[in-house]
Amino acid sequence: MKIGIVCYPTFGGSGVLATELGMALSEKGHEVHFISYQQPVRLHFHPNIYYHEVTVQNYPLFDFPPYETALTSTLVQVITNHHLDLLHVHYAIPHASAAYFARQILKKSRRDVPYITTLHGTDITLVGRDQTYAPVVTFSINESDAITAVSQNLKDETYRHFLIQKDIQVIHNFVDPSKFHQSDKEHFKKMLAPNGERILAHVSNFRKVKRVEDVIFVFEKLHKEIPSKLLMIGDGPERQNAEEICRSLGICSDIRFLGKQEQMEEILSITDLFVLPSQYESFGLSALEAMACGVPVISTNVGGLPEINVDGITGFLNDVGDIDGMAKNAVEILRTDATLQLFKDAALTHAKKFEKSRIIPQYEALYENVLRGYHALT
Ligand code: GMT
């Protein structure tokens, strides 16, 4: 198949998932065309992969350069010139409406293709619900030839907040075990934790919804009981505030802010516990990647997190903001090597349920179904 993938190119989970999906499809022989405003961060060269950059022409009149129009035009050109079979857009805003518009334009010349929308999270639960976007989001989701959500929770949330008249298929996010697995990085661990301290990690885009300050507060409590180090990976609006809190608590020497990192699998290989105290998480791809490296997870019990983190088995689930509970559970996991090993093994075993070999065929089957239905109608 010739598949167009539209996504955000940044470190955010939806872009990462779309990129991993496109690369996996290309390895299976499909021709994959990425369309975005920048090369996606995890995208590697493969003979079956093409990348088309959306460039937005600026003009003195434009206080807000029209990205969606530029994206739609690029879609029309790529579909036409490369004879794509279908479009798969990740994150509804503005990708689903651009896909809809491109399809309408191409209908005139009978070159239109179906589009599939994958809902990822805040496109539904936060930004998309806002009345500034909601009518367009609802319309373009309903017009999609198929809709998928990355968790059962996100599917339920979508029906709760939008008037969706179509079926939404749950296709969970996946992890590539050839990349995310336990590997021996003892030398690296020794550099960061020279006295055998436990290593905790948090990865996010440091937005409010991630409750980054809770990571620091949980660590402060744990650190009083167990010698430990914390790695804060990623960047975003809450980073400065988090660094201030570390300074005011006087624990800066045991916390490292590493910024955005591409080799997450190396950092996860030396991590003992992953902390994700989000206000909401439709899935929590970063937690799954940690689990695939044998790292247990302390997370909140919101959104799709209970679909991947099994309470008391692969880690623990706590209420949002329950710092004491999260710290207590972190201590329980980390207190002895034997307990830690039990949680590590369980995290790894559970992550296998989300390996890419199980999930990619679900997308391929969906594509085939959509194409059959579309061509039967046209
Ligand atoms: O919705 C967002 O915050 C953006 C999105 C992204 O691009 O990072 O994240 C969402 O999609 C990820 C991939 O499906 C999920 O793993 C994240 O849980 C989800 N984030 C939220 O729901 C907050």
Image: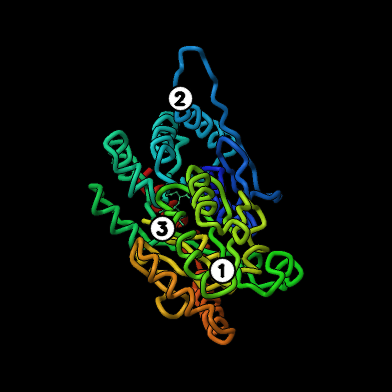
Q: Residue at x 55, y 38 (%)?
A: 36
Q: Residue at x 73, y 72 (%)?
A: 186
Colouring of the image: rainbow
Q: Distance between the Cα atoms at labels 1 and 2? A: 38 Å
Report the front residue among 228 and 121: 228
- Disc 2 designates what residue? 66
Q: Are discs 2 and 3 less than 8 Å apart at CB?
A: no
Q: Is residue 97 left or right of residue 53?
A: left
Q: Mark 3: is the Cβ under 8 angstroms from ligand 1? A: yes
Give the numbered dot on residue 314.
Answer: none
Query: Mark 1: few, some, or many residues within 10 Å (few <14, many ≥20)?
Result: some
Q: Is residue 360 left or right of residue 152?
A: right
Q: Position of residue 285 (x, y in %)?
A: 49, 60
| Type of amino acid under label 1 | Ser
- Disc 3 designates what residue? 278
- Mark 1 or 2: in front is 2
Please tell me which of labels 1 and 2 falls first in the chain: 2
Q: Distance between the Cα atoms at labels 2 and 3? A: 32 Å
Q: Residue at x 46, y 54 (%)?
A: 212
Q: Residue at x 62, y 56 (%)?
A: 256
Give the numbered dot on residue 357.
Answer: 1
Query: Mark 2: few, some, or many residues within 10 Å (few <14, many ≥20)?
Result: few
| Type of amino acid under label 2 | Pro
Q: Distance between the Cα atoms at labels 3 and 1? A: 28 Å
Q: Is residue 127 left or right of residue 56?
A: left
Secondary structure beneath dot 1 equals: helix
| Type of amino acid under label 3 | Ser
Secondary structure beneath dot 3 equals: loop
